[in-house]
């Protein structure tokens, strides 16, 4: 009888040991793979999963330790951009959570930054951008997440509407208070170009290499721009009405001025920016425009830009409609696939 009891105890311990080993192996496996989560036509399952990854990663070992606020490293300067990046290359960082969220380990960042990228058929540029931008942002001691918002289908591209969607989707995962809206082909050339929000909306890509590092025209406000949450709500986000290339950035400039704010820019040395060369994407053709960069896209016969100030209160975040398709959590970024509908009563 004693022998049988001993054998049962041994058997139970063996089962527990094997189960524990299996759990350890699975944990190691999921640490190494590029975890991808899917949710079709509903946000509920993935929101729980996304929150889990955000809450379980980047925790400080001792919650009782009071960490100092982050300060900028003294050696920020010109940044060496790498364009010849193998397409299968990924920047490795154990601190980063799935979905491309990272925050400093030894200090507390004062801003929580969502970087939102409008996207369709630009995989090669996305690889280059990610390879360069993660080290850049971590050097600046940023608490940030990367959101790639992909337009489903082949209808004309609507950059601004995708950026509005990115703002809303990012807030479902983390309490971001700073939003940087960036094209996928623009990379800063100086680490002193701080990816942060300021007291006014900030233009961070006005000194592009393809424009000889100068501001092309006074009202230019595209490429990479930064808004606090309060500033973005104040302008009601971007217009949702610009389909195809161009116009939405000029419209945004008018919104900022109408809201009583100014555009903030660093000097042309710090703001030097690289634009990765590429051909225009199919479905992103120019909007018709007259001289002086004044786009003449119209709605019901009225020029959109001419009525930008009046329209901003009814066209933007408060009129945003889209269909969520799925979210994919990669190690270096979160991709959200959406159906944004089609143009209505727009002549472009």
Image (cartoon, rainbow, N blue to C red):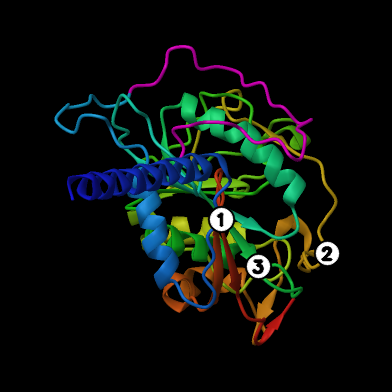
The one of 57 and 323 positioned closer to us in this rendering: 57
Q: In screen coordinates, is 81 left or right of 204?
A: right
Residue 131 drawn above or below residue 125: above
| Real-space CA distance between mark 3 and mark 1, rounded to the nearest whole angstrom | 19 Å
Provide residue 63's location: percent of width, then percent of height: 18, 33
Extent of the magenta region: 71-96
Indicate which disc, 1 or 2, sits on the residue closer to the N terminus: 1
| The C terminus sits in image quarter | bottom right
Q: Which residue is mark 1?
A: 36
Residue 62 drawn above or below residue 309: above
Q: Nearer the viewer, mark 3 or mark 1?
A: 1
Residue 70 drawn above or below residue 33: above
Quarter-of-image position of residue 74: top left
> Which secondary structure dominates the residues rendered in magenta?
loop
Numbered label attached to residue 282: 2
Q: Which residue is mark 3?
A: 151
| Real-space CA distance between mark 1 and mark 2, rounded to the nearest whole angstrom | 28 Å
Residue 83 highlighted magenta (yes or no): yes
Q: Nearer the viewer, mark 3 or mark 2?
A: 3
């Amino acid at each position: 009888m004693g022998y049988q009891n001993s054998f049962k105890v041994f058997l139970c311990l063996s089962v527990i040991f094997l189960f524990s080993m299996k759990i350890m192996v699975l944990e190691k496996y999921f640490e190494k793979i590029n975890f991808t989560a899917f949710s079709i036509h509903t946000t509920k399952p993935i929101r729980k999963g996304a929150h889990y990854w955000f809450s379980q990663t980047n925790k400080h070992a001792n919650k009782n330790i009071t960490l100092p606020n982050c300060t900028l490293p003294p050696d920020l300067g010109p940044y060496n951009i790498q364009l010849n990046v193998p397409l299968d290359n990924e920047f490795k960082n154990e601190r980063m959570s799935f979905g491309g969220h990272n925050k400093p380990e030894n200090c507390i960042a004062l801003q929580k930054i969502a970087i939102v990228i409008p996207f369709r058929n630009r995989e090669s540029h996305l690889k280059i951008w990610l390879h360069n931008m993660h080290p850049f942002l971590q050097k600046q001691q940023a608490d940030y997440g990367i959101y790639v918002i992909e337009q489903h289908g082949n209808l004309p591209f609507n950059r601004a509407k995708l950026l509005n969607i990115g703002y809303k989707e990012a807030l479902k995962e983390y309490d971001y208070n700073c939003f940087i809206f960036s094209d996928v082909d623009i990379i800063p050339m100086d680490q002193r170009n701080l990816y942060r929000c300021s007291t006014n909306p900030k233009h961070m890509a006005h000194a592009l290499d393809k424009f000889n590092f100068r501001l092309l025209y006074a009202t230019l406000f595209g490429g990479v721009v930064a808004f606090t949450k309060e500033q973005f709500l104040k302008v009601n986000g971007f217009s949702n009405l610009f389909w195809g290339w161009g116009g939405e950035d000029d419209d945004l400039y008018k919104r900022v001025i109408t809201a009583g704010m100014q555009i903030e820019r660093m000097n042309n040395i710090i703001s030097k920016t690289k634009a990765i060369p590429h051909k225009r994407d199919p479905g992103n053709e120019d909007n018709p425009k007259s001289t002086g960069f004044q786009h003449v896209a119209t709605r019901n016969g009225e020029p959109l830009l001419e009525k930008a100030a009046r329209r901003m209160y009814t066209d933007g975040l408060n009129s945003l409609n889209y269909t969520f398709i799925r979210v994919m959590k990669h190690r270096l970024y979160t991709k959200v696939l959406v159906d944004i509908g089609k143009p209505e009563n727009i002549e472009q």
